[in-house]
Amino acid sequence: MIRRRSLPVLAAGLLATPALAQAPWPSRQIRLVVPYPPGGASDIAGRLQAQAMTEGLGVQVVVDNRAGAGGTIGTAHVAQSAPDGYTVMMASPSSHLGAPLLFKTPGYEGVDDFSAIATFATGTAMVCVNPGLPIRNIQELVAYAKANPGKLNYGSAGAGGANHMLGVLFMQRTGTDLTHVPYRGAAPALADLIAGNIQVVFDSYSGVIGSVRAGQVRALAVTNPTRWPLAPEFPTVQEQGVPNYDLPSFSAVMGPKGIPEPIVARMNAAINEGLKKPQMIERLAANGNAPFPSTPAEFTTLMRTQRSLWQELVRSTGLQPE
């Protein structure tokens, strides 16, 4: 007797093979690129992001520092990576909004070439003056600047950076004229403010709060639209009469364009859950930051809105891409 082969069963087995070969995500280590050197604020943010994702996803997330060219080397590398969820990055306004406007060939467009996964932490800056000036609030700063156009110098960590743009936005919103003095980093700008060589800085809360508490500089306001929970005694720029003054500072997680939505959703959920943990909240606060959860859609809207604002600010300065 000739036995007939069970073709339907065999065919079903063959058809099932590709599905069985596709392991569920994540099935291996994830790499989180930080486009800046180890040890700085961005590196700290990236390592906290990696911790939250490791705990939430159940696989190791390792930090890969790829520094250089204002953050564009590491960021371009991620933009060109496979959109499989195994390569993501620590993103910030500097890497995705500022750098693409300041470099002729950054290798990427900061919003459209990426998958917006999750915002992570937010910070604020402080408007500080040398204590020798007769200025104790924002209204007095505006009045003094208008009475002395171009005579107040404000320092930044470099042309096109966030604390430069905070000064540009301040001038636009108040109709004042301050002279920008770029430095190679925020620390030398703060040192010159303390020495009286410049009169104003718009610098990160974590960078200046020690000098504020020591009486070396005078803080007039925080740049956040609402009072900063770590220093609620300081009023905001907006509540002192400057409307629409807001240039958000944040760290976030982004990946190459085209990561499947279910993978984005899993990473987003892991990050947001991690931001609820008391230990994570404490670690963020120790670095002057607060949790900043969001959905991917909310993050995308934020990036598009901020891209338009950064384009306007950079254009108004006359800065040319290098």
Image (cartoon, rainbow, N blue to C red):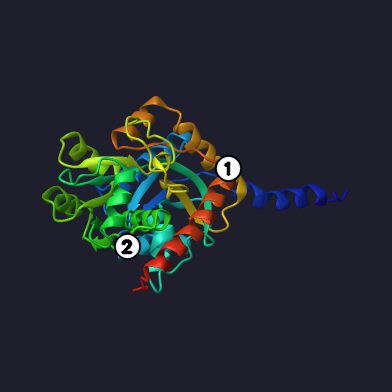
Instruction: Locate residue 265, reporting x and y percent.
Output: 58, 42
Which residue appears at 41% of the width and 40% of the height?
121
Q: Residues within 10 Å of mark 1 (few under 14, many from 20)?
A: some
Which residue appears at 37% of the width and 67% of the height?
317
Instruction: Locate residue 68, reporting x and y percent.
Output: 30, 63
For marks 1 and 2, give the one nearer the viewer. 2
Circle number at residue 265: 1
Which residue appears at 21% of the width and 38% of the height?
212
Outermost residue toward the front in this view:
147
Disc 1/disc 2 C-alpha distance (Å): 30 Å
The reply, left or right, for residue 213 in relation to residue 273 is left
- Residue kind at label 1, given as amino acid type: Ala
Mark 1 touching mark 2, by CB under 8 A? no
Residue 297 seen in render: yes
Instruction: Locate residue 115, reporting x and y percent.
Output: 53, 54
Which residue appears at 32% of the width and 62% of the height?
70
Label 2, on which residue?
A: 70
- Name the quadrant containing residue 132: top left
Circle number at residue 35: none
Quarter of the image with the C terminus is bottom left
The foreground one among 279 and 102 is: 102
**Secondary structure state at the residue bearing disc 1:** helix
